[in-house]
């Protein structure tokens, strides 16, 4: 008997005319044998139920980034765990808003799936969820450092793990699941002061916000590339079947 992979999903149904997508919580059980790893994906795990089904989708609904299931990694230092656990709902909502804004921007500016708020037979529904955070340093409010550091710190603020669910916006049928973890890192930031280029502290508010924006932007660029590849592959497969 095939092993059953139980995915507790929030499935999206948005057939109504409301300007905001409607969410309906449902449970889905998907046979492990039905999941296929997408070849050459930018993500560690991108499994799809039917690669050939993506060709007819023209639009996409992005639901707000979810962080209600986010946990601090159990192996993290207690001081770091306490620091990030003190983050307020408003702080996390503000961070996740960067993702929501980039989703609209990137998919609006590039060819392929067009962002929409209304479900239809040709609309994908996508939700990203933050799952686990392994901090390397405290959040900016708990740091005593100034705005300029004497030495470069390229370790970033931590590693974030996420899960994304892709479904048909009308039927709620599961189409794909993505899982990966990436470093949240703003990279080198320099401040010019006279003839000197000083390394900006990676633990201030501006640097940490930039780090979150960078990782979210990377996820969405990878997602756009993978979905474009899926659509191209499914169209090619249909053309080959038609020629047989």
Image: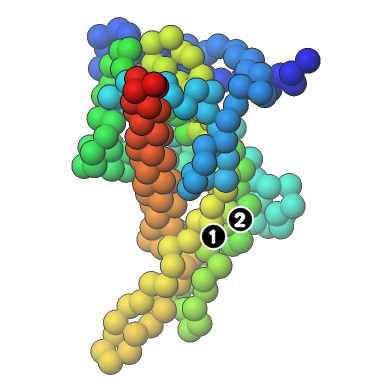
Quadrant of residue 108 in the image? Answer: top left
Q: Depth check: give the residue in front, 35 or 210.
A: 35
In the figure, 71 relative to 186: above or below?
Answer: above
In the figure, 67 relative to 2: above or below?
Answer: below
In percent of the image, x 43 and y 63: which residue is there?
186
Q: Identify the residue at the far right of this view.
A: 1
Q: Which mark is residue 135?
A: 2
Q: Depth check: give the residue in front, 135 or 17.
A: 17
Badge 1 or badge 2: first in the primary sequence: 2
- How far across and down, in percent of the image, does residue 203 sit? 49, 65
Q: Is residue 126 shown left or right of residue 182?
A: left
Its colouring scheme is rainbow
Q: Is residue 226 visible?
A: yes
- How far across and down, in percent of the image, does residue 150 sit? 48, 84
Are the two marked residues, 1 and 2, in contact with CB atoms closer than 8 angstroms?
A: yes
Where is mark 1, residue-wise?
157
Q: Depth check: give the residue in front, 242 or 1.
A: 242
Q: Is residue 6 visible?
A: no
- How far across and down, in percent of the image, does residue 64 sit? 40, 30
């Amino acid at each position: 008997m095939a092993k059953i992979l139980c995915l507790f999903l929030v499935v999206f149904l948005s057939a109504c005319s409301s300007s905001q997508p409607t969410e309906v919580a449902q449970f889905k059980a998907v046979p492990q044998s039905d999941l296929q790893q997408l070849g050459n994906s930018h993500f560690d795990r991108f499994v799809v139920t039917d690669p050939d089904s993506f060709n007819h989708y023209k639009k996409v609904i992005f639901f707000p980034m979810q962080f209600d299931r986010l946990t601090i990694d159990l192996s993290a230092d207690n001081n770091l765990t306490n620091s990030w656990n003190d983050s307020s709902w408003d702080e996390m909502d503000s961070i996740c808003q960067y993702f929501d804004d980039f989703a609209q921007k990137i998919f609006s500016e590039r060819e392929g799936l067009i962002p929409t708020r209304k479900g239809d037979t040709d609309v994908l529904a996508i939700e990203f969820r933050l799952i686990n955070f392994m901090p390397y340093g405290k959040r900016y409010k708990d740091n005593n450092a100034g705005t300029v550091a004497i030495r470069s710190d390229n370790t970033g603020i931590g590693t974030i793990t996420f899960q994304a669910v892709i479904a048909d916006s009308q039927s709620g049928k599961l189409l794909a699941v993505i899982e990966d973890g990436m470093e949240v890192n703003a990279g080198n930031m320099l401040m010019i002061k006279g003839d000197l280029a000083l390394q900006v502290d990676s633990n201030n508010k501006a640097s940490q916000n930039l780090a979150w924006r960078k990782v979210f932007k990377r996820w969405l660029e990878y997602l756009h590339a993978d979905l474009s590849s899926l659509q191209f592959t499914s169209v090619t497969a249909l053309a080959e079947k038609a020629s047989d």
